[in-house]
Image (cartoon, helix red, strand yellow):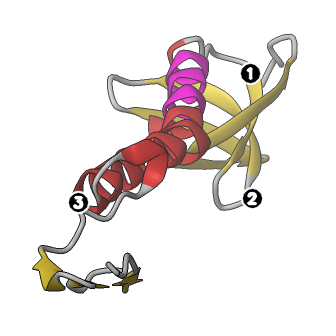
Amino acid sequence: MSTKWRLAVIVPGALVLTLSAAGVAFAAPAQASGLFGLSQQSASIVYIIVLFAILYFLMIRPQQSRQKKHQEMVRKLSVNDEIITIGGIYGTVVKLKEKSVIVRVADNVRMEFTKSAVSQITGSKEPEKE
C-alpha cells in the first residue's frame, strides 16, 4: 500500500520546506511581491517617485506661482502707487530706480527699499503737490 501525503511549510522570505512520502525537499525562497506585484525594491523606488511628485504639486509649484505673481507686481510698480513692504511699512512710491524704490512714509520722510521688499500694492493715488 502506498501512502500519498504531502505537507508544505511556507514562511515569507525563508525556505520552503516540503514533506512528502518520497522525502524532504527544500526550495529557494519565493520572490516577495510588493505594490502591484512589483518587487520590494521596485515598490520603494515607485514610492519615492510618488512622494516627490506630491511634494512638487503641494509645495514647489504653488511657491513658483506666487513668485511669478510677485515679480509681475514688482515689474508693474509705478510712481504714486500706495504700497506695503514686507516689514509692514505703508507708503507711497516717489521714485523708481533699477533695483530699488524710494517710498514716502510721512511728510518729509523718504525711505529706500529694494523692489523685492514690496509686499503688495494697495492702490494708486493722484500726485500731490509739495
Q: 58 or 126, which is in the foreground?
A: 58
- The nearer-to-camera label among 1 and 3 is 3
Task: Confirm or deny contact between disc 2 and disc 1 (CB under 8 A).
Answer: no
Residue occupying the point 37% across, 86% down? 11
> Residue 44, how many percent across, how many down?
32, 59
Q: Is residue 99 left or right of residue 74?
A: left
**Residue 50 visible to an observer of this rendering:** no
Secondary structure mostly taken by the magenta-highlighted segment of the chain = helix
User: Secondary structure under badge 2?
Assistant: loop
Q: 60 or 14, which is in the foreground?
A: 14
Count neighbours of disc 1 (C-alpha within 10 A) and say few if under 14, some if 14 to 19, many if 20 or more.
many
Residue occupying the point 59% across, 11% down? 76
Count neighbours of disc 2 (C-alpha within 10 A) and say few if under 14, some if 14 to 19, many if 20 or more.
few
Residue occupying the point 24% across, 62% down? 31
Quote the CA–CA distance across marks 2 and 1.
16 Å
Q: Which of marks 2 and 1 is nearer the N terminus?
A: 1
Instruction: Give the residue at mark 3.
Output: 41
Q: Quadrant of residue 92?
A: top right
Instruction: Give the residue at mark 1.
Output: 81
Highlighted magenta segment, given as a residue range: 64-74
In the image, residue 81 above or below residue 58: above
Instruction: Give the residue at mark 2.
Output: 88
